[in-house]
Image (spheres, rainbow, N blue to C red):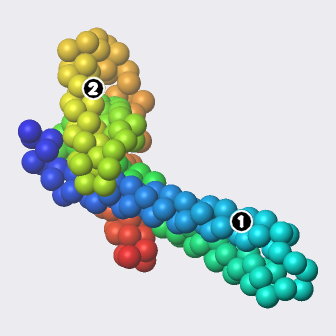
Amino acid sequence: MSDLTGKKYVHAAEFLNENAGRLVEKHVSAVKGEASRLKEEADLAKERYLKAPPGSDEAKFQTETEMAKRAAAEDLETDAASVARRVGSKIPVVGLGITAAGIGWDIHEGKPPAKAIISGLAGAGAAALVAGPVGWGALAAVGVGIGAGALVDYGWDHWVPEGAKHAINEGAEAVGHAVGNAASAVGHTATKIWNSIF
């Protein structure tokens, strides 16, 4: 609960980013499906053209239909590729920024750097494995991410020997402080990327 309430803005950003990713996937899939349907119609028009008397109005009509359907399918495929490149490729970047911001917040609040980094990455990884529809799927992903992070925190506190914790923290301290100091800058950059997309 403390993670959920303390990082409510981070989790809200995760939810929005997850939804954006799922919406992009849904849009690209629908557009590709429509392009595939148009190609099938173009193939059908070609078959009808081959069966029509040469030079007839029917042959001319089927040729024009085939060309129009193929052109429309190509336009849709270009649109799908553009959306995937322009928007879809930025979703993971924003997600990494949100994860870094969450880790930075944990370090700022006193969590040991190694513990913050490990639980933050575990939560992000677990959330990425959750599939589902827009809305509920994104909410489930955020919930699974929080749960995975809490589980790793518990394991760190109860199962990792103190000597190992100390050694790991020494190695991660420099990285952890860098993440903590960079969290606001990363968050600002992620916001700029998000605003440039939408």
In the figure, is residue 26 to the left or right of 5?
right
Name the front one of labels 2 and 1.
1
Give the residue number, with chain letter if any, for mark 2.
152
* Side of 142 where 195 appears, left or right: right
Classify the position of the N terminus by image quarter: top left
Amino acid marked by disc 1: Leu
Q: Residues within 10 Å of mark 1 (few under 14, many from 20)?
A: some
User: How many numbered callouts?
Assistant: 2
Secondary structure under tag 2 reads helix
Q: Residue at x 81, y 81 (%)?
A: 59
Q: Quadrant of residue 18?
A: bottom left
Asked if residue 192 is positioned above or below residue 136 in the image, the reply reads below
User: Whole-Å distance between the Cαs marked 2 and 1?
Assistant: 57 Å
Task: Residue under label 1, please give it.
Answer: 44
Image: 112 above or below 70: above
Q: Please state if 121 lies on the left or on the right of 139 as rendered.
A: right
In percent of width and height, residue 197 lies at 43, 74
Relative to 188, residue 65 above or below: below
Instruction: State the residue at coordinates (71%, 65%).
Output: 44
